[in-house]
Image (tube, rainbow, N blue to C red):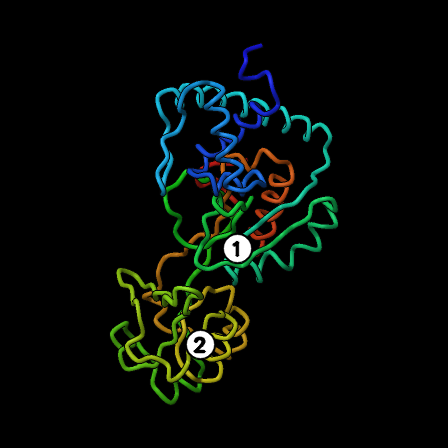
Amino acid sequence: MSSVLSSLESLNGLIAFASAVQTGGFSAAGRQLGLSASAVGKAVERLEFRLGTRLLNRTTRSLALTGEGEVLYHYVDKVLKDLQEAERELNTRQGTPRGRLRITATPVLGRRFLVPALHDFHALYPEVKVALSFDLPRPDIIEEGFDLALWAGELEDSSLQARRVGSYALITCASPGYLAENGTPTSIADLGSHCCLHYRHRGNQRLEPWRFQNHTISKPPIPAPDCHLNDAGALVEAAVAGLCIVQLPDFVVREEIATGRLQEVLQSNAVAPLGVFLVWPPMSAQALRVRVFIEFISKRAGDQLNITGTAASGQP
């Protein structure tokens, strides 16, 4: 056995080294491994000392592999993937998903589709403990250690895997009372004379743009007076109360449209349906608890969004 594998300390150093390369930093690697950034850094330093060579060039903002580091990472990554595959096969044979499952979702999707599903999922898989977080803007799921995300709209190009589980339309609507008092807009230009209330994101306070065919409105021409809302349910109530026009996903206003409390406007200008996606880091789906949740929510959300889940950039 070579000297680098002759101690548990060296094995820990190899794991810390690989994690630092995969996540891009000691802090992110520490979160992935349940260690401090300092502990990861020291483990890599001890590994370098044992090998007698530098593996990583470090700056305050990034890590870069040296030539020797590239050689070592090539083999370490292959070994770790083989071990993960072995663990996956063992878990599959055991047939019992278990462990903690960390999920992030946009608030409206999380409340609408995930929270109501948790009881049924727990009944099927009682040994999986779900930790659900509602986050806007979207977090870096690798950096923050999430197993899965449920997101709507366009996805950025990345190494993440994704499965489309449904689609939704954006509905521009107002109450009958508001339209009777202020008139019904028949073109996008007409919105310039109306009170339009956009969703305001937490944290960065960014307004969610309104999307139409070949046109995007980044901010309202006439802001709603003394009113800034960062909750979809509150936007619905504001529209029902006759305060303004809003644009929201169809599954948020479906009941209000069906009962006549809200009326859709500018339907001919509506943008094409947008996607709802489950997203996960490539290695997350090695865990059985992640795979069963992907299948469970794909079916559940697909039934409610009237679409069968399909692969966007990969499947577990």
Q: Amino acid at mark 2?
A: Gln
Camera-nearest residue between 252 and 123: 123
Q: Which quadrant holds the C terminus?
A: top right
Q: Compute the Cα span from label 2 to label 1.
A: 28 Å
- Disc 1 is placed on an element classified as strand
Say which amino acid is labelled 1.
Answer: Ala
Above or below for 123 versus 258: above
Q: Position of residue 130 (x, y in %)?
A: 65, 50
Direction left: furthest residue: 189
Q: Looking at the rendered structure, which numbered label has been put on residue 127?
A: none
Q: Nearer the viewer, mark 2 or mark 1?
A: 1
* Lateral position of residue 211 relative to residue 113, left or right: left
Which residue is farthest top?
1
Q: Quadrant of the N terminus?
A: top right
The image shows residue 154, relative to residue 237, as above or below, that is above
Percent position of residue 183, x then y: 34, 85
Judging by the rendered image, the residue that carries numbered circle 2 is 263
Residue 227 found in image quarter = bottom left
Name the residue tied to disc 1. 105
- Residue 261 x, y percent position in the rendering: 51, 79
Q: Looking at the image, which residue is at 58% across and 57% down? A: 113
Q: 280 or 119: nearer the eye?
A: 280
Upstream in the sequence, badge 2 or badge 1? 1
